Image: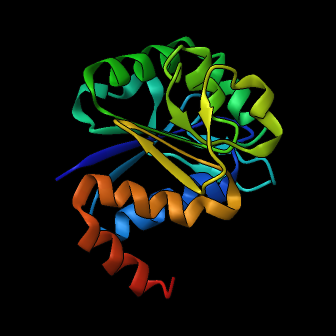
């Protein structure tokens, strides 16, 4: 069974984080919600509080096939400033494991030097932080083991692409049909 960890920080965009959790679980992919805060309760950007399964320091990141970074503000900044998050994301990219980032979160990958000369997409308001990246205006971009997406309006496309890269196109189509997408 494939395993994914979704890292949540105060100020995360709820739709981006929870759509991934919901659709991957429908696809029978194991998903662990991980708080990078000092509490299991993470406060979303729009006042939705989410209880995570684990705190960052409780997780063995060697167990996972993919790490996902939702966007939102100040959630993206909280993720970007967390030493452990930066370390895990760099390790996953280096080892060829999947890294997913949506909305403003691709700027985290850029700040780590993981997008230089690569294709990616991001929230239109943060494009200025993405120099030396081959930006596209598509909903989701897959460049080797890095998957990026634009934002709330592309969250379902993003989650379905994550399912596809982990479990195949047929499973992604099955989930898309099941949610009338």
Between 146 and 32, the residue placed more toward the observer is 146
- From this view, report whether residue 93 is shown above or below residue 39: above
Q: Position of residue 127 (x, y in %)?
A: 76, 33
Q: Is residue 93 left or right of residue 113?
A: left
Task: Give the image's coloring scheme.
Answer: rainbow
Between 108 and 46, the residue placed more toward the observer is 108
Q: Position of residue 130 (x, y in %)?
A: 69, 26
Between 17 and 47, the residue placed more toward the observer is 17
Instruction: Name the residue at 80% across, 27% down.
Output: 128
- From this view, report whether residue 119 is shown above or below residue 28: above
Q: Is residue 99 visible?
A: yes
Between 51 and 4, the residue placed more toward the observer is 4
Q: Is residue 94 left or right of residue 80?
A: left
Q: Position of residue 177 (x, y in %)?
A: 40, 86
Q: Is residue 5 left or right of residue 30?
A: right
Q: Is residue 38 visible?
A: no
Instruction: Name the residue at 42% across, 78% down.
Output: 176
Instruction: Name the residue at 60% across, 21% down.
Output: 110
Quadrant position of residue 79: top right
Q: Position of residue 1 (x, y in %)?
A: 16, 53
Quadrant position of residue 67: top left
Residue ranking furthest to the left: 1
Instruction: Name the residue at 32% across, 17% down.
Output: 94
The number of callouts visible is 0
């Amino acid at each position: 069974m494939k395993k994914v960890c979704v890292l949540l920080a105060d100020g995360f965009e709820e739709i981006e984080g929870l759509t991934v959790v919901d659709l991957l679980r429908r696809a029978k992919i194991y998903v662990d919600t991980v708080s990078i805060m000092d509490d299991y309760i993470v406060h979303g950007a729009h006042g939705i509080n989410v209880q995570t399964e684990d705190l960052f320091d409780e997780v063995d990141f060697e167990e996972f096939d993919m790490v996902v970074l939702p966007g939102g503000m100040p959630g993206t900044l909280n993720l970007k400033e967390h030493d452990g998050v930066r370390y895990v994301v760099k390790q996953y990219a280096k080892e060829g494991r999947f890294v997913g980032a949506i909305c403003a979160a691709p700027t985290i990958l850029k700040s780590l030097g993981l997008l230089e000369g690569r294709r990616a997409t991001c929230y239109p308001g943060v494009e200025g932080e993405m120099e030396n990246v081959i930006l596209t205006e598509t909903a989701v971009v897959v460049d080797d083991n890095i998957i990026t997406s634009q934002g709330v309006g592309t969250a379902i496309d993003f989650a379905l692409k994550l399912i596809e890269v982990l479990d195949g196109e047929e499973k992604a189509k099955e989930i898309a049909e099941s949610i009338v997408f």
